[in-house]
Image: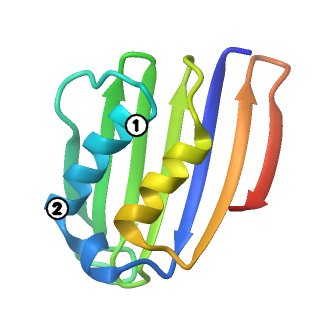
Amino acid sequence: MWGQHLILDLGECDRTAVRSVETIRAFCQELVAGIGMTAYGEPMLEHFAVHNPSAAGYTLVQLIETSNICAHFAEAAGEVYVDIFSCQPFSEDTAIDICRAYFAPRTISRTSLMRGAGRTTVHSSAA
């Protein structure tokens, strides 16, 4: 295996939290620490798609020493889309628990990939 890739789709989230730059920064910091990673620099956090209210929201990119964490926060829909990729193993359940604590989603769709050139395996479920 080359790397572990967790893809989370969080639905019906706390809309105040999804719109809060302070909450998103705190989430990122706790997520990095909680899954045992080391942040490489500060996270990039930008508000995008203001011309399209249905897509508008913050996008987060945090480099970690073993790869990256990316997320988009869709404000109008109250949805959060998180991708964590690392060549160092991490607890997916811990990542989900941190997402729940910060954004209180009513639904979570989870896709786990164990990545390797020519040998990627996929597992999907509701969390």
Q: Earlier in the sequence, mark 2 or mark 1?
A: 2
Viewer-proximal residue, 113 or 52?
Answer: 113
Q: Position of residue 35 (x, y in %)?
A: 46, 33
Which residue in the structure is indicated by mark 1? 34
Per the image, label 1 sits on a secondary structure element best described as helix
| Position of 77 relative to 22 (above/below) | below
Q: Is residue 65 visible?
A: yes
Q: Quadrant of residue 49?
A: bottom left
Q: Quadrant of residue 101?
A: bottom left
Q: Quadrant of the N terminus?
A: top right
Q: Position of residue 74 (x, y in %)?
A: 38, 72
Q: Residue at x 22, y 38 (%)?
A: 43
Q: How many residues crowd around disc 1 within 10 Å: few (fewer than 14), some, or many (20 or more)?
A: some
Q: Residue at x 45, y 23 (%)?
A: 67
Q: As shown in the figure, which amino acid type bears the numbered disc 1?
A: Gly
Q: Quadrant of residue 99?
A: bottom left
Label ID, residue 21 = 2
| Position of 44 relative to 125 (above/below) | above
Task: State which mark lies toward you, 2 or 1.
Answer: 1
Q: Quadrant of the C terminus?
A: bottom right
Q: Residue at x 57, y 63 (%)?
A: 9
Number of numbered callouts drawn: 2
Judge from the rendering whether residue 23 lies leftward or rightward of residue 113; answer left or right: left
Report the Cα–Cα distance between label 2 and label 1.
20 Å
Q: Residue at x 84, y 19 (%)?
A: 118
Judge from the rendering whether residue 23 lies leftward or rightward of residue 81; answer left or right: left
Per the image, label 2 sits on a secondary structure element best described as helix
Q: Position of residue 97 (x, y in %)?
A: 50, 55
Q: Position of residue 6 (x, y in %)?
A: 61, 42
Q: As shown in the figure, which amino acid type bears the numbered disc 2?
A: Val
| Position of 83 relative to 33 (above/below) | below
